[in-house]
Amino acid sequence: MSSVSRILAAARPSLSASARAYTTVASEAPKATAAATEGYYKVTQTRSLIGVPKSTIKVLKSLGLGKKIGRPVFQPHEPSAAGKILKVKELVKVENMSGSIPPEGFQRTRATKGYKVVGKML
């Protein structure tokens, strides 16, 4: 046996033991609850979709954006939402919000056609 193969043979049991210890610790870790992930990203589109690849437009549409610039949507703190946001990070503004989504979600700042907003009522 060469010296390299002896070193590798000596190292293998320690690697597998550490790997077993890691899997044991990882399996004993408590599962994430809904309360731990309670929070939302407030995602607002800030740039136009003109000249953007179709795959990026599809991601933006899956986030609930793409119709109007400046209209926010709320996405839960989840890896899938975070990945989508990273894909379109140049086109959106993201704010981290704790707690739950406001009941109104998005308040209309424009009046419907034929009406005029005079002031906000509390």
Image (spheres, rainbow, N blue to C red):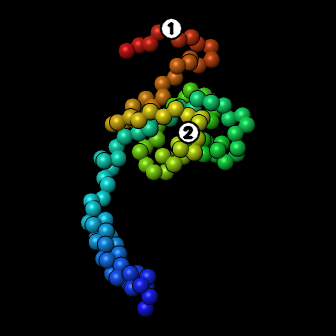
119 vs 67: above or below: above
Considering the numbered disc 1 on the image, is that residue within a helix, a strand or a loop?
A: loop
Residue occupying image coordinates x 36% and y 79%: 11
Label 2 Cα neighbours within 10 Å, binned few <14 / some 14-19 / many ≥20: few
Disc ID at residue 19: none
Residue type at the position of mark 1: Val
Closer to the camera in the image, 26 or 43: 26
Residue to which mark 1 is pinned: 118
Distance between mark 1 and mark 2 Cα atoms: 36 Å
Disc ID at residue 89: 2
For the C terminus, the quadrant is top left
Residue occupying image coordinates x 52% and y 32%: 93
Residue occupying image coordinates x 62% and y 13%: 114
Q: Earlier in the sequence, mark 1 or mark 2?
A: 2
Asked where in the image residue 53 lies, by quadrant, the reply is top right
Closer to the camera in the image, 118 or 11: 11
Would residue 91 be found to the left or right of residue 49 on screen?
A: left
Residue type at the position of mark 2: Lys
Residue 66: % across, % down: 62, 36
Considering the numbered disc 2 on the image, is that residue within a helix, a strand or a loop?
A: loop
Q: Kindly give the residue lying farthest to the front in the view shown.
A: 3
Instruction: Give the foreground label among 1 and 2.
Output: 2
Q: Kindly give the residue lying farthest to the top in the view shown.
A: 118
